[in-house]
Amino acid sequence: MSSYDVIIIGSGPGGYVCAIRCAQLGLKTAVVEGRETLGGTCLNIGCIPSKALLHASHMLHEAEHNFAAMGLKGKSPSVDWKQMLAYKDDVIAQNTKGIEFLFKKNKITWLKGWGSIPEAGKVRVGDDTHEAKTIIIATGSTPSALPGIEIDEKTVVTSEGALELAKIPKKLVVIGAGVIGLELGSVYARLGAEVQVIEYLDHITPGMDAEVSKTFQRILSKQGLAFTLGAAVQSVDTAKSGAKVTYKLRKDDSTHIVEADTVLVATGRKPYVDGLGLEALGVKMTDRGQIATDSHYATNIKGIYAIGDAIVGPMLAHKAEDEGMAVAEVVAGKHGHVNYGVIPGVIYTHPEVASVGATEESVKKDGRAYKVGKFSFMGNGRAKANFSGDGFVKILADKETDRILGAHIIGPMAGDLIHEVCVAMEFGASAQDLALTCHAHPTYSEAVREAALACGDGAIHA
Ligand SMILES: Cc1cc2nc3c(=O)[nH]c(=O)nc-3n(C[C@H](O)[C@H](O)[C@H](O)COP(=O)(O)OP(=O)(O)OC[C@H]3O[C@@H](n4cnc5c(N)ncnc54)[C@H](O)[C@@H]3O)c2cc1C
């Protein structure tokens, strides 16, 4: 029996980052991972492969739509789908091997296999039982399918199957207009598929600032994605080739059938805790199937902690990473902390969509006096040069104190731009603080400054 200070179950962004921080803090650390490669959902079947396909398909879109206008003439590239998948797999391999290297560098042991917790202080992997003063569960999440819909990962797929379809579908139906559905829907739309997105709500991207959500839908529609909103999917029936999706429109209860080669079920994810033995241990769960923890990530069982997608909060890689670092600090007797008010969310379509903090709807609901500063990318020279004028930056600030409450960006590199607002919010900055900060010209970030200026006496280029 080998013994460790810490055993982490799961090597996703939560688990591997936690392991590295534990090792840096001098703790003898092991990670249990059942997959053949490290990195979890994010590196193997999530963030990284989806971004590789988004990048490749965006390049094609640029070649087809913007090259000629810049004087780059000639035939647009054709798609070699096999090669595109190989490129995606290579990107995955580079990243997962990178984590293996970091484990070796930090002397972290990889216990290969699926882990369970027979009792506090013990982790079983295959026939071996290991001892640990602290156990951290970082087992992530899995797609939550709609009841009655059978997933075969060929014709009816989750995001996992959608990342390695045998061929590009002629018609793709995406069920669910959340981040994953829209990112993967965009990939296939750019590659030539007819994409129809069916969403139960009457708007896309639930939880997003409504103004951004509307603009986003308009832009995606222009790119060829069709939206059927307010529609409840009843069934998905697979035929010899393809599938039939039956849905009911909520406004008039009318039933409709749509045929597709491929159906992507992107209706959310749920925590994955199967096989850990949590019930027998008496680990407290929330009514949504998440592991219940206190503010220090401790479960109700002494010595067992949990982080990432398996617990409450946004299912995001960087949230899991931050919790991984925080819990490592806690276990090492320090003060780990995550500021949940400043966790950015990004959709990596083109344009990108990014947000942090309060939405206009949430500040209204809180009855808070606020002001809005908005600036369109049409007024940004760099964006115009790069065919990226669609979209805007919106900053919400407290009416009295000018303190930044939230920011929402739809436009080029929004996922990078949002971080200057995140840093500003971490330091409790006012919109004026951002507005008085010199921004290099010509950069997209000038649009952020202009939106901050618009919270005060006005933007310059509006
Ligand atoms: C298609 C897609 C795209 C996404 N894109 C983004 C994005 O762009 N940005 C973003 O922030 N988030 C994105 N996400 C979400 C992100 O992947 C997750 O939030 C993140 O991976 C959660 O990290 P985690 O460490 O909690 O768990 P995971 O990454 O899910 O890792 C958990 C690991 O635990 C292992 N495991 C589970 N049970 C056991 C066991 N009993 N024994 C051993 N090992 C076990 C699993 O094999 C897995 O490797 C995306 C997700 C998907 C599906």
Image (cartoon, grey):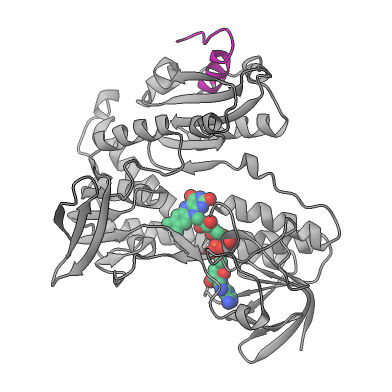
80 versus 251 height, above or below = below
- The total number of labels drawn is 0
356 versus 277 height, above or below = above
Residue at the location (19% across, 68% down)?
A: 237
Looking at the rendering, the stretch of residues picked out in magenta corresponds to 446-462
Residue nearest the observer in this picture, 21 or 66: 21
Q: Quadrant of residue 147?
A: bottom left
Judged from this view, the residue extending furthest toward the bottom is 127
Report whether residue 292 is seen: yes
Report whether residue 38 is seen: no
Residue 58 coordinates in the image, percent (x, y): 34, 41
Left/right of residue 324 with respect to residue 201 in the rendered view: right
Residue nearest the observer in this picture, 231 or 403: 231
Q: Where's the N terminus, which quadrant?
A: bottom right
Q: Where's the C terminus, which quadrant?
A: top left
Q: Quadrant of residue 341?
A: top right
Residue at the location (40% across, 43% down)?
A: 205
Residue 340 coordinates in the image, percent (x, y): 65, 45
Residue 116 coordinates in the image, percent (x, y): 63, 81
260 versus 434 height, above or below = below
Magenta stretch contains residue 136: no
Residue nearest the observer in this picture, 313 or 163: 313
Residue 169 coordinates in the image, percent (x, y): 21, 57
Residue at the location (61% across, 56% down)?
A: 320
201 versus 269 height, above or below = above
